[in-house]
Structure formats: C-alpha cells, structure tokens
Image (cartoon, helix red, strand yellow):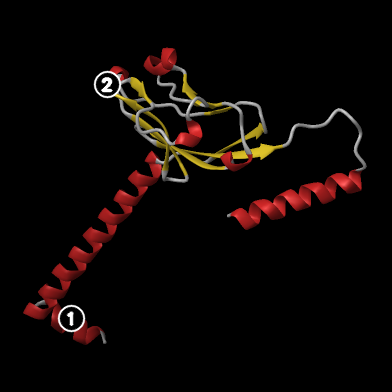
Amino acid sequence: MIHRLKALKGSTLGRLLAVAFDTVLYYAIWCCIVLLSLLSEVSLQVSVVGFIGDSAVLPCFSKERPLKEITVYWRYNDDLNVYDIIDGQGSVEDQHSAYKGRAEMFSDDFEKGNFSLKLSDLQHNDTGKYICYASDIHTVELLRKNKPSKKKINPSKQKKKETKEHNQDQRRL
C-alpha cells in the first residue's frame, strides 16, 4: 500500500488527488467558519413568564450603531407582525390585529440599543415564540400562567386543572 502511495506522489493522478484533497479541506474549513459565525449571531433563547391579563416585557438588545437608523422586526412564530421599528421609528402599519393596542416599545431607549417589547393584556393565545430581528436574532419564549387565586384550592383539584389546561394547549399546537 505504501509503495502505491509513493508511486502516486510524483504522478499526475497523485497531484490531482492532492489538489482535490486541499480543495475539499478548504471548503470544509470555510463551512465550519460560516456556521460558527452564524451561531455567534444568534442569541440563546430566553423564556419569559406572564400572567393572563397582565403585561410581559420580552427583551431584545442590540450593539449595532447608529441606532437612529436601525430597523428591527418583532414576529410571533416567525410569521405574525407584532411590531416594527423602521429607521429608528416605531411602526404599527402592518401590525397583526391581535396586537393592536397591546404591543408597545420603549422608544426612549432605542438609542441605548433597547428594543424590548411590552405586551399588555396577555391572552391564552399569546403563548409561543417571539423573535426580535435586530443586529442579532433574539428568540423569546412567552409562557403564560393563570394568576394565582387568593382563596385556597385543594391541591389535587389544582393539579387536575393544570393538566386540563396543558392538554388544551397541546391540542392547539
């Protein structure tokens, strides 16, 4: 086997194989670098818990400058338009009707890179994945809980109620 490799080393076929190997190695390294750079731009997923009827703040921060001209998009499940910031100005022109009057931004903090979204009057169907497309991609999972009641509930009844709600949520997905 070693004799065959030595014989190929000086031949045209050997040189072609060496070039092919170098090319494959180059593209493999290039693909790894691209994947690593993409992964570094995507932030880790954050979970936020909100109570039905209350408000929740979904965090999104950017280091990009100049922030006066930045464009940021908030989407629900990668589809519904929750809120847009176009050239540093809030825009609800294309906002989905489910978020009208309930989604707001902290516009005074745009210059600081804060593009967090405040979602008011949380509803059952607000649960899910929200994505903030800024200089980085921020994913926020909104989890909902019912407000704790002030009266004492039998623990076994509470567990049955939570199980029933969980099953309803799973059927909806």
Left or right of 58: which side holds 157?
Answer: right
Along the viewing direction, whichever of 64 and 105 lies nearer the viewer: 105
In the picture shown, does residue 28 fall above or below 151? Answer: below
| Residue drawn at point x = 52 percent, y = 41 percent | 45
| Residue drawn at point x = 39 percent, y = 41 percent | 40
Q: Secondary structure at mark 1?
A: helix
Q: Is residue 44 visible?
A: no
Quarter of the rendering containing residue 155: top right
Q: As drawn, which residue projects farthest toward the front? A: 97
User: Residue 161, position in %: x, y?
Assistant: 81, 47
Q: Which residue is mark 1?
A: 6
Along the viewing direction, whichever of 29 and 9 lies nearer the viewer: 29
Q: As drawn, which residue projects farthest toward the top? A: 108
| Residue drawn at point x = 31 percent, y = 28 percent | 71
- Indicate which disc residue 69 carries: 2
Left or right of 149: which side holds 68?
Answer: left
Quarter of the rendering containing residue 127: top right
Task: Give the residue type at disc 2.
Answer: Glu
Quarter of the rendering occupied by the C terminus = bottom right
Along the viewing direction, whichever of 125 and 166 lies nearer the viewer: 125
Left or right of 73: which side holds 159?
Answer: right
